[in-house]
Amino acid sequence: MRKGAIAFKELWISSFGAKLKLPLSFSKRVCYNHIVMEQEKTKIDIYDFDKTAIPYDSALHYWFWSMAHCPWTLILLPFQLFWGFLMVTKILPVPIFKKIAFNFVSLINTEKTVKKYWDKHEKDIYDFFKPENRDPSHKSVLISASPDFLIEEIARRMKIDYCIASPHSRKNGHLLGKVCRKEEKVRRLNEILPDAEVENVYSDSLDHDRYIFALGKHCYLANKGELKEIDFEKEIKAYDEAKSEKKAKKKAK
């Protein structure tokens, strides 16, 4: 905050206190607290999860793992493969697919199987995401499109301060709100940390996570555990131009 702005606030609060005949010490204390609150914004680092902090899509990986370790869930496999085909061919929108894709959890003990899954696959987490390698002066925020019942457990193990993921029922696996992707990531972040100062953003997808990248002072593109700092505005402009050019060529054919 500029000195002129601080001086103005001090003058205004002191004058306000005088009008109410409050002690000078009280006015100074209110002014000081007001300035400190404005100056000390929460600094955060934002992490995507799938293919950023871990090599694969954890939701899909967990789906296969559950089928293998809880074979009775295979009774649902024909339906899920059919829904998956409809999603891949873009007949069925991703949000609708995700509403029904995890209905197998109604046949298993979700809490128990999730813990067993991470007991086995916690080792797959990339080093940069582990607590000892993160900046302790920043709050860590994990934002993922994967189900919250799956992501919250690994967030707890990795000592993440805030975990935001797609809300699913732990009883039947149904999606209870919007899939936490693209603009929804920013909306959910603003719900819990509206005044946060975003220092670093980590993701594997320049396109899908452009909305959270746009918030960061420093942006890192993740690829197989390796991080590359990028100039986001420059990179996204080049990406969009290349995408538009590709579409134009396709139309011309």
Image (tube, grey):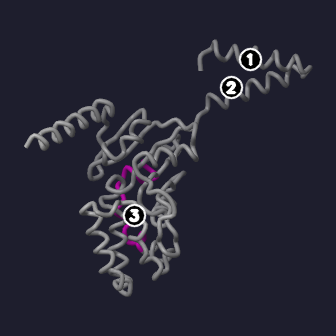
| Among the two numbered marks 2 and 1 on one chain, the one whose residue lies closer to the N terminus | 1
Find residue 26 and report its horizontal and vertical position in percent. Answer: 85, 25
Residue shown at 87%/16% (left/top)? 18
Q: Are marks 2 and 1 in contact (CB under 8 Å)?
A: yes
Q: Nearer the viewer, residue 138 or 239?
A: 239
Label 2 vs label 1: CA separation? 9 Å
Q: Which residues are magenta?
A: 117-133
Where 96 falls versus 35 (above or below)? below
Describe the element under mark 2 as helix, strand or loop.
helix
Q: Which residue is mark 2?
A: 35
* Secondary structure type for disc 3: helix
Residue at image point 30% right, 35% down: 230
Residue occupied by mark 3: 96
Q: CA distance from mark 1 to mark 3?
A: 54 Å
- Crowdedness near tag 2: few (<14), some (14–19) or many (≥20) residues, C-alpha within 10 Å: some
Q: Nearer the viewer, residue 226 or 143?
A: 143
Any mark on residue 10, and which?
A: 1
Q: Residue at x 57, y 46 (%)?
A: 191
Label 3, label 2: how many angstroms apart (C-alpha)? 47 Å
First-in-chain label (1 vs 3)? 1
Q: Position of residue 164 (x, y in %)?
A: 50, 54
Badge 1 element: helix
Q: Residue at x 48, y 37 (%)?
A: 198
Is residue 225 found left or right of 26 in the rendered image? Answer: left
